[in-house]
Image (tube, coloured by chain):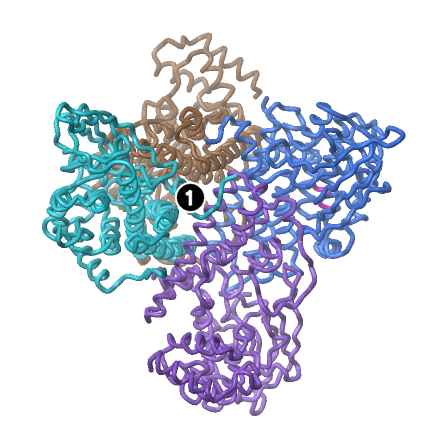
Chain colours: A brown, B cyan, C blue, D purple
């Protein structure tokens, strides 16, 4: 499959489908034509083409003014649920879930983290107990974005507390409309509630919603997590495209705020931002050439630290003016804009960048062990029954 | 002069009693509730600190109704207030008291000792002379009866929302303005730090009383700003200590991977490094208040040093507190964000660390390029 | 223009062959021996790099005896030379070649491609235009036959100790000086970095040949300095990578407390952070040489960026290497100190990070206060 | 015992002893008068007086122009050997060793660290085997300052490899003149050889040179190490008294070197240096008031980092000039002057500050566990026979 043949296929599709027709109809037809995610198998929205050719298709559709599937809104479905269902799902599960997932008819959320299991995800305490031909689930999940909009959740639950922690887990697709699922907004330091707490009380799930074998939940979850880490945001930003651009503009347009000490700090941050941007460009060039590397972890670590420092400097540069906030309303934003709102919002929100999606501490462990090959720490929790672990 | 940088036994006793009081009256839930309310501060707590215990006028002489203690004692109270991120206008009132003491304004000092809030009416980032000291232009005109009238705006003033009297620099002089005067309007600001919220002042022919002009006004204002910078360091110290203590306590009881999170060496080393900075913050903060209290010629340098060190330290401590609490530290329910916001607002109050380093360039004879 | 920041297959093959050669000919013991000897560099290794393999004239066109490759290939060689802290005047010769290419000095380029060392005769910290570019005052006079004579001193010149020809800026022009000329004296300097030792030049009516004057000289010099700053970043990258690799290898095999030291989390996190910086250093270093090689209008900015990032990174990598080796890393026998010294000298060569940030202030339109 | 009565005692001693007499005679007499270290017991150079009164005595002797015992030269004896012998020695050992130690007739060195046991001191491999009424010692020690001048060494050796690591150690006083003791200079990154390697090959030590019981070596060594950490250099420095003074003077006297970016860096370092100096003053005030605290560890950590950064900035400030070194001779300096020689020497030597006398990493562990009360890491090496530990 070449880029050219794909372009022809898209053009052929567009010839037969009006981009102004019903949005959902259009997206379903695109899926059925194998032009959704071209690296997926035929019949499941793809053509078995190389993944690197996806942008060719997306750009062609975008150029034609075709409706998209609001990819940011369904990011968890696209990035995490779909590859996991593809790899571990039964034929029925793939057929049932992937199409409405891709067309955004069904929004997905991730039910992994718990109040007692954050960095140590394999320590989840949510229980799933056999109940006839299904399961009864009880527990609490946290930091669940989109849960209040989601139709389905990917759920990691403990089915055998007497097994060692990694061995007693099973992976489910959780019906978010099932009785016993309660979603509560979780307010964060910014005042908003981007995330949710999800309380599961006697939630009954059919065994057909189990993904992978009983006790194999950790292996399935690793597929999900791998895909989380592979994801890098869309196109490379232009120079000063991110948060550094905001700071640089403030510096340029507000000469009365400048001091020599802050000048050097702004320059240091500019250097780091540009270095990170070039790193992203190099990484994308490698990915495009089929040479994926571990540099994505470096980008997330550096990005979190950098956005925190840039926004912190911006607030300091503004002085008393920088201490004014826009509002503390408990809004429920659907799209995260790290450079949006005011300086104090940016500064506060950036604090989450080193916690969400894997803390910087967990990422450093991963880099040290998987990239650098440094030895693991002695583990005290892997050979013990989960129920006997100290907590 | 060798200044004593330790705490006296009396100061330790004072700390214990203030901490006990704040534990009872300014717990997490209460502070969060006040911060999220439209009220600018905790009026009950202020009454306790001022009318009931006299702690708000510790450094006011006894014959004016104060406790006749020194700024070294006041600083201990500020450590505890910082530790509690208590939403009270204590720092502003203390700085106003310093101003009034320099000016010999006994009557206002008596009001203050009686529990009235008196606040300096300046943007919160104005510090001791240096590039950070940008006073807004407030115009002074004269009423028919010859009394002064003020016109202009002052944005981002701390501790002034419930003040009865504002001490305002204008036209190179200092004025007292009745905060309820016709012609003066206070507008609350949605503030990053709602435990010390800001307000904007707008004046249209606001009647004022001249307190001092010329050199006398300038030197009083300068001395009060030096004292403010020095005292703020103790608040930052207390805040940082709370962040360290609370993080350590959390990491001792939070288990992940079958072990207390506090047993992970990377976190231990970061907290050890933070403690190293904190130990030094205690020395520089004590040195600053001791120098100011003693009228030491080094007081200005000591205050700049304290802010250059303690401002960033408090921010770092609060940032580590949030990060090491993981998700819970990023929630609204956990108080870590209150400390984070206070630390940042304190790092700007009375001049940023960068401003104070610039001041040190002169004070320590390290000229720029 | 989108520059390709990856390595080509040919470049990877080049790297492998250079690394193999340096493993055989520039091992620790050998480098330490040369560094501790009175010899300024490793003459055998230089012969291998220049006469035997032509690697020293990679970017010189084939018709002048070079390999006709680009600076992107030269940079790969420099990564490996940095990795080995090889004591050879490769960087200076490469910068001299850039100068001569700009000036069309084919004869000198042929000499250079034949193995002659030709070095720019400037203090090693002179970088692309900016506050770091302080050229010493060398006076130009005229001999009876009308040929130029140079008088003055140039201190702290790198890669010039065994040079046959020196390319010297003087009086706004560029001259070629025979290094063995009467009237020119080279004095070796006891250098921090004995793997790239400095020498001082003193001239009393040293005969010289004018290469270029005015704008032509200035632009050639400037372009060569930009290239030097860009290329140096690759050397720093290679050096930092060696430090990281060697430290990781040491920590995997060194046991304390019954476990490999590399299993201690605090060290793991520091090395992970170092790797994060290194990943970015690779991008900026590749970007800089690609921009210079392509004549990209951004080349000057790219070079300044590369030095602002890679200079401090290499120092930090070497410092962590020493520290994490513990006592052994502080001994003379272990090569860590050679990397530490080279990293520091490289952080100053072609301008410090601070100088390059100052240059960026103009290039990125971020004016000072 | 009051300061006044001590001053009188010194004056009385001085009345009877000419400060110009033979140095050794004077020092021996001072020791015998209990005016050496006043907190030591009577008969062992002291009067059982409070330790804080020692400066009173020292200042009085110094003011009278009395010879001193070159305290820097015998630092290891005074600071480490003496308190250990006092606490764990027999009456004979105290009587034999303390007097010539204090008078500097006998220099001491410390034989603890080994190539394979640095941070993990309890892992030492040097073996001491029973040999009739004595011991035969074989092994290698490293980083031994003053070994080439020393008459005696405090030695930690393994007497039972089958015991867990901390249990199999015994502490000896090693005769540095015994056959089989070979001292070789150890050259360091600065080119000098401040330290030594000590090779012990069949060194025979009488059992009377054993300090403490067999197998109790770790407890005895802890006394030594505690005293190492308590030590803080003499008097508080004046402002800019240390390495920051060198940098500040260069900044003031060489305006042509200044840049705005380095200006802020110099100011940052000045702030840190002054903060550390004030911390030292506060610590001394606390010690003088009998309130010792753990802040000494903070000072060592901060000092190491600060000297490294100040000297690094100094070299950078000087540019090409800063890359000139004075010499690479393999000198054997007896006194360490961290602000001596040139900028490159200072910068290189400062790298040792975070390694010698307990690495900064070990110190951070100690601070985290003993000061902050954070839990220890899981240990895998404490219950195992030393000989079976991986290494």
Image coordinates of residue D170 in percent, x first then y, are: 50, 80
Q: Residue at horizontal 43%, vertical 40%? A: A305
- Residue topped by disc 1: B357
D50 or C136, nearer to the observer: C136
Q: In this view, does D90 lie above or below C322?
A: below
* Start-end of magenta stretch: C15-20
Q: For the residue labelled by badge 1, is the local secondary structure a helix, a strand or a loop?
A: helix
C122 or C50, nearer to the observer: C122
Q: Residues within 10 Å of mark 1 (few under 14, many from 20)?
A: many
Q: Residue at horizontal 69%, vertical 58%? A: D327
Q: Which chain carries label 1?
A: B
Q: Is residue C236 above or below residue B70?
A: above
Q: How many marks?
A: 1
Dominant SS of magenta comes to: helix
**Residue A334, magenta (yes or no):** no
Would residue A205 be visible to someone looking at this image?
A: no
Q: Residue at horizontal 34%, vertical 11%? A: A22
Q: In which quarter of the image is residue A292?
A: top right
Query: Considering the image in quadrants, where does the N terminus of chain B appear?
Result: bottom left
In the picture provided, is C44 more to the left or to the right than A86? Answer: right
């Amino acid at each position: 499959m070449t880029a050219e043949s794909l372009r022809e296929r898209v053009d052929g599709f567009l010839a037969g489908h009006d981009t102004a027709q019903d949005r959902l109809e259009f997206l379903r037809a695109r899926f059925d034509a194998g032009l959704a995610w071209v690296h997926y198998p035929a019949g499941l929205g793809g053509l078995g083409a190389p993944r690197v050719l996806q942008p060719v298709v997306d750009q062609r559709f975008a150029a034609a003014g075709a409706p998209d599937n609001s990819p940011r809104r369904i990011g968890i479905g696209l990035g995490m649920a779909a590859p996991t269902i593809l790899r571990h799902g039964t034929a029925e599960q793939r057929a049932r879930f992937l199409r409405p997932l891709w067309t955004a008819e069904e929004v997905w959320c991730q039910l992994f983290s718990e109040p007692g299991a954050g960095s140590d995800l394999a320590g989840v305490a949510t229980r799933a107990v056999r109940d006839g031909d299904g399961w009864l689930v009880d527990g609490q999940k946290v930091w669940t974005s989109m849960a209040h909009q989601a139709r389905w959740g990917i759920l990691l639950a403990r089915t055998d507390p007497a097994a060692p922690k990694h061995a007693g887990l099973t992976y489910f697709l959780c019906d978010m409309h099932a009785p016993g699922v309660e979603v509560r907004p979780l307010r964060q330091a910014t005042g908003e509630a981007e995330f949710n707490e999800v309380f599961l009380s006697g939630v009954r799930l059919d065994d057909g919603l189990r993904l992978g074998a009983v006790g194999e939940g950790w292996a399935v979850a690793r597929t999900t997590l791998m895909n989380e880490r592979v994801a890098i945001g869309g196109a490379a930003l232009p120079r000063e495209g991110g948060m550094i651009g905001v700071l640089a503009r403030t510096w340029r347009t507000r000469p009365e705020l400048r001091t020599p000490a802050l000048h050097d700090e702004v320059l240091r941050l500019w250097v780091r931002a540009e270095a990170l941007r070039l790193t992203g460009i190099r990484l994308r060039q490698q990915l495009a050439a089929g040479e994926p590397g571990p540099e994505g972890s470096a980008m997330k670590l550096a990005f979190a630290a950098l956005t925190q420092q840039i926004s912190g400097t911006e607030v300091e540069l503004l002085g008393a003016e920088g201490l004014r906030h826009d509002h503390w309303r408990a809004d429920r934003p659907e799209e995260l804009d790290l450079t949006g709102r005011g300086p104090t919002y940016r500064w506060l929100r950036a604090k989450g960048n080193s916690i969400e999606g894997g803390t910087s501490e967990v990422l450093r462990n991963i880099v040290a062990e998987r990239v650098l090959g440094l030895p693991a720490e002695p583990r005290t929790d892997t050979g013990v029954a989960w129920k006997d672990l100290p907590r | 002069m060798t200044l004593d940088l330790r705490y006296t036994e009396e100061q330790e006793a004072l700390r214990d009693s203030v901490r006990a009081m704040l534990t009872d009256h300014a717990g997490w839930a209460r502070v969060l509730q006040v911060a999220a309310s439209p009220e600018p501060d905790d009026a009950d707590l202020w009454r306790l600190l001022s009318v009931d215990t006299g702690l708000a006028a510790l450094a006011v002489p006894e014959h004016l109704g104060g406790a006749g203690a020194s700024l070294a004692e006041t600083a201990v109270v500020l450590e505890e207030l910082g530790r509690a991120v208590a939403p009270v206008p204590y720092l502003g009132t203390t700085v106003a008291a310093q101003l009034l003491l320099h000016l010999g304004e006994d009557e206002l000092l008596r009001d203050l000792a009686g529990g009235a809030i008196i606040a300096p009416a300046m943007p919160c980032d104005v510090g001791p002379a240096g590039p950070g000291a940008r006073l807004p232009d407030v115009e002074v005109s004269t009423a028919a009866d010859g009394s002064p009238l003020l016109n202009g705006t002052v944005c981002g003033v701390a501790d002034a929302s419930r003040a009865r009297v504002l001490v305002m620099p204008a036209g190179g002089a200092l004025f007292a303005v009745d905060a309820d005067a016709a012609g003066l309007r206070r507008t609350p600001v949605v503030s990053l730090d709602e435990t010390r919220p800001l307000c904007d002042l707008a004046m249209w022919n606001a009647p004022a009383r001249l307190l001092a002009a010329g050199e006398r006004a300038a030197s009083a204002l300068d001395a009060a700003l030096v004292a403010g910078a020095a005292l703020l360091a103790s608040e930052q110290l207390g805040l940082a200590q709370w962040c360290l203590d609370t993080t350590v306590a959390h990491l001792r009881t939070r288990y992940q991977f079958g072990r207390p999170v506090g047993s992970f060496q990377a976190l231990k080393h970061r907290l050890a490094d933070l403690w190293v900075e904190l130990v030094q913050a205690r020395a520089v903060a004590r040195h600053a208040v001791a120098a100011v209290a003693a009228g030491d010629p080094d007081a200005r340098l000591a205050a700049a040093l304290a802010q250059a060190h303690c401002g960033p330290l408090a921010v770092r401590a609060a940032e580590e507190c949030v990060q090491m609490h993981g998700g819970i530290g990023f929630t609204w329910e956990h108080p870590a964000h209150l400390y984070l916001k206070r630390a940042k607002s304190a790092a700007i109050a009375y001049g940023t660390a960068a401003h104070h380093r610039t001041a040190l360039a002169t004070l320590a004879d390290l000229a720029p390029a």
